[in-house]
Image (tube, grey):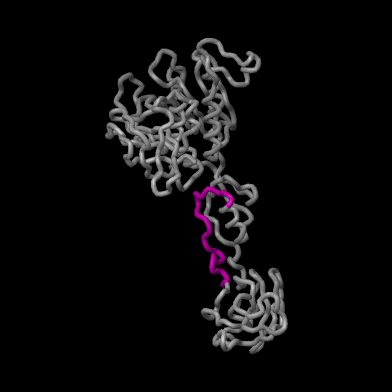
Amino acid sequence: MDMSATPGAAMVSVDEHLATVLAAAASLPVRSVALADALGATLAAPAVAAFDLPAFENSAMDGFAVRHADVAAARADRPVRLQVVADVPAGSPLDPPLAAGEAARIMTGAPLPTAADTVVPFEDTLGGLADSLGEIVVASAPRSLGAHVRRRGEDTPRGGLVLPAGTLLGGRQLAALAAVGVTGVTVASAPRVVVVSTGSELVPLDDLPARGGSLRRGEIPESNGTLLAGLVHGAGAVVVRREVVDDEGDDLHDLLDAVTTGPDACDVVIFSGGVSAGAYEVVRQHVTQMTFGPVAMQPGKPQGFGVAGSTLLFGLPGNPVSVAVSFEVFVRPALLALQGRARLHRPRVRAVADSGWRTPEGRQQFLPVALDRSDPAAWRAVPVSGGGSHLAGRLGAADAYAVIPADLEVVRAGDPVDVMLLD
């Protein structure tokens, strides 16, 4: 799909533009890292268990390791007496022999003696823990042979798949790998990203103290770079450079050449602003490797995309809400695809519109909303921006985007709507 740079060009759909982006997002090289260094990375190869989990048969309860035949008939009016001949705490290497009528006191996680096949919890004996050495009285028969015993490999056998390629490695995933003896994994490289904010009106935050914290007429604080840096980090990528470029674009060619060529070339460049049809659209006028055109969405209609060498180039609109939405719809899936992530898109759920609003004709709408989750059975989507793509101050209150189809003209209070979850 070629997005024409001609003003008035026909809009393409969100799905068409996304397909163009993802077709160019080839997986990055992989690397091997210690498990302790893999947090936040994406698994690039299936991870299999080095050990059985559990590694040995063990007790699921604090109680007594017994032979089921000895206690199968136990009941309150006909208890069974057993002699405790051993004590097996967790971590013990002991494997005590048990003859008929004998038991071993055992703690949760301790290895089950080879001679035993069942565990009787303390609660099913008359003396419990207080009278757990010497002779015990079993007053309740186990539910079955093998009761309260964890079998070797019943969770995951050695060589079994623990996590597939494409899995994001968080705390739970790393713990699962550690439990089966995995000490290192193969992961995708983190995409290296350059963020470029454009506009002569932008004042970098670092410059404000020297100006007494004041702005001249026509100036605004540069916030898109901060927004994009946070979103990039949340997608598992790394911002390696941030720049602010004015509307003249004198340094833009040198900047682009520096970050797209040579051994230090980055993987992605994200421009905010300068992609529309106005007179001072610096990205559109100077970045010849990109094509530009309208996408049938609100906000975020003006979009640019291209490839320079192996670097993906994204041209996003300049209004902050447009930047945030465009990132979620196009840039984030590309960053995840570069990492080989199995799931490229945010989860979506249904919620009820808290109030009504009009939708743009012929364009898919992404409206920032705050989710009222007080009723778990009926979440409510509360608009926070009123549809204005410039309302950066309200964007922080949003934790989802209501996604409205292009053929829907109006949303009424109480209507069910799809929402893309951001947190």
- Identify the residue shown where x is 48% and y is 26%: 392
Residue 164, placed above or below residue 52:
above
Residue 276 occupies which quadrant of the picture? top left
- Identify the residue shown where x is 50% and y is 17%: 199
Residue nearest the observer in this picture, 189 or 383: 383
- Left or right placement of residue 92 versus residue 196 in this view: right
- Left or right placement of residue 129 versus residue 242 in this view: right
Quadrant of the frame with the N terminus: top left
Residue nearest the observer in this picture, 103 or 229: 103
- Left or right placement of residue 5 versus residue 196 in this view: left
Residue 205, placed above or below residue 63:
above
Q: Is residue 308 visible?
A: yes
Magenta segment boundaries in residue numbering:
150-171
Q: Is residue 313 visible?
A: no
Residue nearest the observer in this picture, 9 or 372: 372
Residue 141 occupies which quadrant of the picture? bottom right
The spot of residue 60 in percent (x, y) is 60, 70
In the rendered image, residue 236 lying in the magenta stretch gets the answer: no
Residue 355 occupies which quadrant of the picture? top left
The spot of residue 14 in percent (x, y) is 35, 34
The spot of residue 163 in percent (x, y) is 52, 56
Outermost residue to the top: 217
- Magenta region, main secondary structure: loop
